[in-house]
Amino acid sequence: MMKTNKIIYWIATSLMCLLFLYSASMYLLKYEMVSGFFVNLGFPTWLIYPLALLKIAGVITVLTKWSHFLKELAYAGFLFDAILALAAHLMVKDGAHITAAIGIILIAVSWYFDRKVYPKQ
């Protein structure tokens, strides 16, 4: 059972991390395109670079498990980011809400199985 839990954890966590790293890379490498999306969604463009850096820091924190508190903070930040993205995309009806919904599922599965595989000591 523990092997199955680890497999589920690593699949969900890897996909979640890839999703957030992809998002951060788009924020950093395609700033003009992303700023257009932000304006369309009603968000200020000054958030783009800080969000990109926080997404990268969150991925590092989740994968290294250096601090339980920071890992929990990273999961919470990912969840808030994905929920706000889902709501924003649904409001403007641009069809991009599916990625945010998948992100929420991956975050929940990764967080749940993190507790099963790596219980707090």
Image: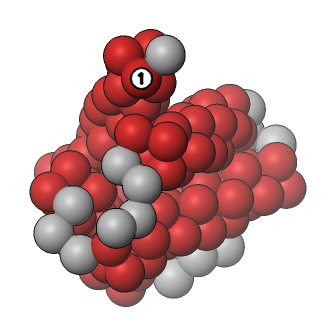
Q: Position of residue 87 (x, y in %)?
A: 78, 58
Task: Quadrant for residue 27, please give it.
Answer: bottom left
Task: Quadrant for residue 101, please give it.
Answer: top right
- Residue lying at 58% horizontally and 45% vertically, measured from the top left: 112
Residue 32 visible in the snapshot = no
Q: Is residue 94 left or right of residue 52?
A: right
> How many numbered tags mark residues here?
1
Q: Is residue 17 left or right of residue 88?
A: left
> 46 or 73, which is in the foreground?
73
The crowd level at tag 1 (other Cα within 10 Å; few <14, some 14-19, many 20+) is: few
Q: Position of residue 75 (x, y in %)?
A: 47, 63
Q: Position of residue 4 (x, y in %)?
A: 44, 14
Mark 1: secondary structure: helix
Vertical order, 49 against 96 (above or below) = below
Vertical order, 79 against 111 (above or below) = below
Quadrant holding the C terminus: bottom left
Vertical order, 117 against 61 (above or below) = above
- Residue lying at 25% horizontally and 46% vertically, measured from the top left: 21
> 98 or 63, which is in the foreground?
63
Q: Position of residue 32 (x, y in %)?
A: 30, 58
Question: Label 1 belongs to which residue?
Answer: 2
Q: Amino acid at mark 1?
A: Met
- Residue lying at 66% horizontally and 73% vertically, measured from the top left: 42
- Residue lying at 36% horizontally and 49% vertically, measured from the top left: 118
Figure colour scheme: secondary structure
Task: Quadrant for residue 56, please give it.
Answer: bottom left
Residue 77 visible in the snapshot = yes
